[in-house]
Amino acid sequence: MELGGEIVTHELGAGETLLVHPGHVGMFEESVSFDITMIRGITNAIFGGDGLFLVQLTGPGRIWLQTLTMPNLAHALMPYLGRQEPASTAQTVEAGAAGAVLRDIFGGQR
């Protein structure tokens, strides 16, 4: 099993519930109940920034949460990845015109 960031473990008591962002759930014991719930309140839905859903984990049992979600991991890696600049519209038009000329010279079909 591979999780991102730091791992936070928590022991849930019988009937104890914890609401967690879905991306932070790493693992949980079989005895833990896993349910998806919708965030209540229009303000939370619009301004919350974490989406519309949370995971409701209900004990008893141990849970393992990860601090680094996949989107945050991708964001953290961005400075270290090469970046390909998109071709400008002018370059695309020039390439298209050059291709048409070469096609005419070498007898290609249009």
Image (cartoon, rainbow, N blue to C red):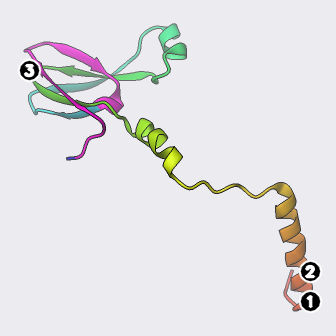
Looking at the rendering, which quadrant does residue 94 occupy? bottom right
Q: Indicate which label's residue lies in the foreground, 2 or 3.
A: 2
N-term mark: 3 or 1: 3
Classify mark 3: helix, strand or loop. Answer: loop
The amino acid pointed to by label 1 is: Ile
Label number found at residue 101: 2
The residue identified by callout 3 is 60
Cβ atoms under marks 3 and 1 closer than 8 Å: no
Q: Residue at x 89, y 77 (%)?
A: 100
72 inside magenta stretch: no
Q: Nearer the viewer, residue 20 or 2?
A: 2
Q: Residue at x 51, y 9 (%)?
A: 42
Image coordinates for residue 28, horizontal then vertical, percent: 16, 32
Q: Residue furthest bottom?
A: 106
Label number found at residue 105: 1
N-term mark: 2 or 3: 3
Label number found at residue 58: none
- Residues under labels 2 and 3: Cα distance? 72 Å
Q: Nearer the viewer, residue 81 or 109?
A: 81
Image coordinates for residue 51, horizontal then vertical, percent: 46, 24
Classify mark 1: helix, strand or loop. Answer: helix
Q: Residue furthest front?
A: 80
Say above or below: 28 vs 73. Answer: above
The amino acid pointed to by label 3 is: Pro
Q: Residue at x 51, y 52 (%)?
A: 81
Image coordinates for residue 30, horizontal then vertical, percent: 10, 33
Q: Nearer the viewer, residue 10 or 19?
A: 10
Say above or below: 23 vs 1. Answer: above
Label 2 packing within 10 angstroms: few (<14), some (14-19), many (20+) = few
Residue 99 located left or right of residue 11: right
Looking at the rendering, which quadrant does residue 29 occupy? top left
